[in-house]
Amino acid sequence: MTEEIKPKQQTEIHSTGNGSDGHPSQAVESEGRPHLSAQAQRDAEIEEIQKRSHHQPPTIQRPPEVPPAPLRRALILVGVLLAVLVIAGGMTIFGRMTHERALAKETELETVPTVAFTYPQKEKSDEELILPGSLLAYVESPIYARTSGYLIRWYKDIGSPVKKGELLASIDTPEIDQELNQARATRQQVLAQLQLAKITADRWEKLRNTDSVSAQEADQQESGYRQAQANLAAADANVKRLEQLEGFKQVYAPFTGVLTRRLVDPGALINAGDGGVGRQLFDMARVDPLRVFTSVPQAYAPFIKVGERTFITLQEFPGQKFTASVARTANAIDTNTRTLLTEVDVPNPDNRLLPGSFGEVHFSVGSNVDKVTVPVNAMLFRSQGAQVAVIGPDSKIELRAINIGRDYGTTLEILGGIAATDRVVINPPDSLEDGQQVNVAQAKPNQQSAPASPNGQQKGSGQ
């Protein structure tokens, strides 16, 4: 209908244009009736369209009514749904718990350390025990001054052999000299007072016999005499003390030996005693014989006898042996090192051996002590002493104390604590504890093989 209206409108618009004579009013009047008829026609069409829209039936239809489901069926559906939800939740929780258990087990396995091991190598028993030792002077003493003063001169330098009683140094003591003179003068005064007191006491004793004086007065004079005697004894003691200090002006050697140190020069201020600055004059040592201290392992302790002959070797004297003898032992095992402290004396008449040197003591023990060697990196150094970690049959650690014999550089000789059949941990961590569970590493092709069992078969080295 709109398409029909548009041509009419256009006709109407074109009909309203100017006439040929230029007067538009005449054109409107001549065409007034056709314009009114077209308007009426349009109104009729609009009215007809409105009537059609009022009588048109509705296009939206209601859905068909469904009868409600029975109650039993609804409950079954709800129960099935809840069961599905419970099963799904249980499976989720079970999967999570399984994952947590696996994670905990893996974490526990990672916390257990993995260690490698080796078997100790058995050594052949020998008849000689070689131990390190330090050579020390038989007697060593510092020399101090007993009087204060200034050093005038020293007569022996370091390295000089001296005899007992030989003069070592002289000290100038002007204060002591004046004190000695004063003490002697005081003694003379006391002696004069003593003589006067004696004369007076004797005179009063005679007067008392004639009853010229009282007994009290005579006793007083006798007491004065005895007091003068005591004063004289004190003056004598003071004089002797100062005379002895005067004697210390000369420093003499207390024993035969060698001067190893000289700590003063002429003009130095010397203080008496062992306190203060400048107190020590010399160090003196007796070097014939020399003492050698060494620690004998507990396994060899029963074979060390006092008076037994032995010998000493030093690196600076290759091929030479210096005869020695066991002088004394501590007669007790050190609880920290499990060793016996032993002293060996070495004669040194020509002073070839020097105090402070390092040597080796050779003992002829004549024993069959079982000895094994382990790598150095198997050692554990703790407050309990030297230890090694041994893997037990249940893969648990056993910390064992050991007795060390000789040090070969890369290996150590062990005299007790482990056997050749023990699995010793290599490079044990510092956190390793006794009874700790460990994982044993698989044996590599080049790993040290297990020792042979008594029946000739080798023991396995697996886990």
Image (cartoon, rainbow, N blue to C red):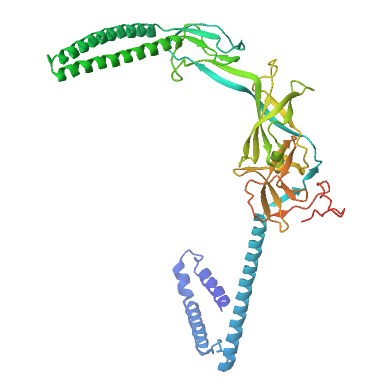
Q: Is residue 66 visible?
A: no
Residue at 48%, 63% in the rendered image: 22
Q: Is residue 285 visible?
A: yes
In the image, residue 105 above or below residue 280 = below
In the image, residue 358 above or below residue 90 = above
Taking the image as shown, residue 149 lies to the left or right of residue 456, namely left
Q: How many labels does the image show?
A: 0
The picture places residue 144, in percent across and down from the top left corner, at 49, 16
Hey, which quadrant is residue 308 in on the image? top right
Which quadrant of the rendered structure holds the N terminus?
A: bottom right
Taking the image as shown, residue 428 lies to the left or right of residue 41, namely right
Residue at 15%, 20% in the rendered image: 216
The picture places residue 406, in percent across and down from the top left corner, at 73, 36
Which quadrant of the rendered structure holds the C terminus?
A: bottom right
Residue at 63%, 72% in the rendered image: 94
Q: Residue furthest left?
A: 212
Q: Which sits in the foreground, 54 or 386?
A: 386
The picture places residue 383, in percent across and down from the top left corner, at 59, 43
In the image, residue 182 above or below residue 374 = above
Q: Which sits in the foreground, 330 or 124?
A: 330
Residue at 19%, 19% in the rendered image: 219
In the image, residue 72 above or below residue 163 = below
Q: Which sits in the foreground, 304 or 226?
A: 226
Q: Residue furthest front?
A: 210
Hey, which quadrant is residue 176 in on the image? top left
Taking the image as shown, residue 63 lies to the left or right of residue 276, namely right
Q: Which sits in the foreground, 339 or 106?
A: 339
The picture places residue 163, in percent across and down from the top left corner, at 59, 12
Q: Residue furthest right?
A: 456
